[in-house]
Image (cartoon, grey):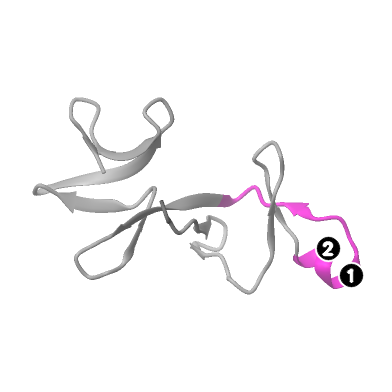
Amino acid sequence: MNRTIKFRVWDKKANDWYDSSRFLLLGDDGTLYDDLSFSMGGNPPKECKDCIIQQFTGLTDENGEDIYEGDIVNFNNKLVTIDFNEAEACFWGGSNDQRYIM
């Protein structure tokens, strides 16, 4: 199975996607760190508390745009938010009463 693994990061403080030219580190505990300070001057990386990591689902929409977890998509004429279900090891969308495996 050949699947592209990629991520994007939302910066809540800047209200924008994280600048892809910056370096990010993911700690063993899942903490995200901004590595710009480390790579530029040897300072320890700073914890990025205002960032949300989203993983690519491997799917694209009808326009060929990548779908990431957290995205809201129109599925069967219903708006659903894409989430990762750890128990089922799959991406899914929907509400609590009705879920759709992606």
Q: Can you tell which mark lies on residue 41?
A: 1
* Label 2, residues with CA under 10 Å away: few <14, some 14-19, many ≥20: some
Above or below 58: residue 101: above
Marks 2,1: beta carbons within 8 A: yes
Circle 2 sits on which residue? 38
Q: Return the residue nearer the eye: 85 or 13.
A: 85
User: x, y percentage for residue 100?
Assistant: 21, 37
Identify the residue at image location x=77%, y=54%: 46
Q: Secondary structure at mark 2?
A: helix
Q: Return the residue nearer the eye: 37 or 2.
A: 2
* Label 1, residues with CA under 10 Å away: few <14, some 14-19, many ≥20: few
User: x, y percentage for residue 50?
Assistant: 60, 51
Identify the residue at image location x=75%, y=61%: 35
Magenta range is 36-51
Q: Give yes or no for residue 56 being in the magenta stretch.
A: no
Q: Given the image, on which type of amino acid does mark 2 rest? A: Phe
* Among the 4 quarters of the image, the one containing residue 29: top right
Q: Can you tell which mark lies on residue 88?
A: none
